Image (cartoon, coloured by chain):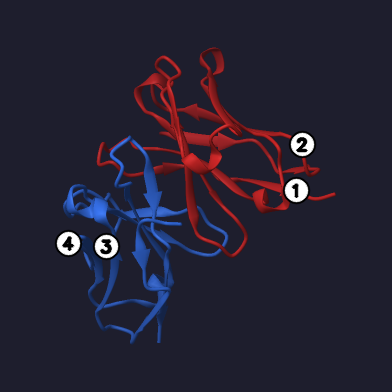
């Protein structure tokens, strides 16, 4: 079973703010990165490290972390943000193993 | 520019093995660990393991221990993932991916290779 837990689905009105959370013991020690995946496409990293955006990722995407929970916030959601989102981090064993979260489907209304 | 180009779709029978290839270009092959991630139809992302091209050391997810082998061919800058004893549960898109930015994340991905296991 996955060690990083996400809500299966969330919805947000166009232009509003949505926060997606990821819970797991390893997040007390390691940062999560976040991936956006649209149907038929490979995932794209949107946030990595403490709160870093790769080139080309809009600044409406931001990341944060507290305790065992990492969060991805989309401020002013756009229609093109509708996608599946996955968190990713090391697993809690510390043996250089990695794990993805269970994924969250974001619907923009 | 960094590119990861994977081999094409494959169909295998239950009990067989499959090899998926990932040809790297645009960077020094030994500089970044190669990871493999799979995604079954309608399901989430699943990390399978990594291979260090500089020496060949590997680390596999417990779920795939004993069934997966990740290797590389330095002469052609290509990583290979072999999965054996296939079942229908192994039907999935298989991706190779690397962390170039150094943020413990995956910033470059192959296009994916669909493996279908069917009798």
Q: Of the numbered discs in the image, which one, if any, rests on residue A97?
A: none
The alpha-carbon separation of the residues under discs 1 and 3 comes to 39 Å
Chain A image colour:
blue
Where disc 1 sits, the SS reads strand
Residue B110 visible from this viewpoint: no
- Report which residue position mark 2 lands on: B16
Q: Tell me the quarter of the picture where residue B18 sits.
A: top right
The alpha-carbon separation of the residues under discs 4 and 3 comes to 16 Å
The alpha-carbon separation of the residues under discs 1 and 4 comes to 40 Å
The alpha-carbon separation of the residues under discs 4 and 2 comes to 44 Å
The reply to whether discs 1 and 4 touch (Cβ–Cβ < 8 Å) is no
Where disc 4 sits, the SS reads strand
Q: Tell me the quarter of the picture where residue A76 sits.
A: bottom left
Determine whether, in the image, residue A54 is placed left or right of residue A66.
Answer: right
- Seen in the picture, residue A75 relative to B52 is either above or below; the reply is below
Label 2 marks a residue whose chain is: B
1 vs 4, front mark: 1
For image coordinates 39% across by 29% down, the residue present is: B33
- Report which residue position mark 1 lands on: B117
Q: Of the numbered discs in the image, which one, if any, rests on residue A64?
A: 4
Q: Position of residue B39 (x, y in %)?
A: 56, 53
């Amino acid at each position: 079973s996955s060690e990083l837990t996400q809500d299966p689905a969330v919805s947000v009105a166009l232009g509003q703010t949505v926060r997606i959370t990821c819970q797991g013991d390893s997040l007390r020690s390691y940062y999560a990165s976040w991936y956006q995946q649209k149907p038929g496409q490979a995932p794209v990293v949107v946030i990595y490290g403490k709160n870093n955006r790769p080139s080309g990722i809009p600044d409406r995407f931001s990341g944060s972390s507290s305790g065992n929970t990492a969060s991805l916030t989309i401020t002013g959601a756009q229609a093109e943000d509708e996608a599946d989102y996955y968190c990713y981090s090391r697993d809690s064993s510390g043996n250089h193993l990695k794990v993805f979260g269970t994924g969250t489907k974001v619907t923009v209304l | 520019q960094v590119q990861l180009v994977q081999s094409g779709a494959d169909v295998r029978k239950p009990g067989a093995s499959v090899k998926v290839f990932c040809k790297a270009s645009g960077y020094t092959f030994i500089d970044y660990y190669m990871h493999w991630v799979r995604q079954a139809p309608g399901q989430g992302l699943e990390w399978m393991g990594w291979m260090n091209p500089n020496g060949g050391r590997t680390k596999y997810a417990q779920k795939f221990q004993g069934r997966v082998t990740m290797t590389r061919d330095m002469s052609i800058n290509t990583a290979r993932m072999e999965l054996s004893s296939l079942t229908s549960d192994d039907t999935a898109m298989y991706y190779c991916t690397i962390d170039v930015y150094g943020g413990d994340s995956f910033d470059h991905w192959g296009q994916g290779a669909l493996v279908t296991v069917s009798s």
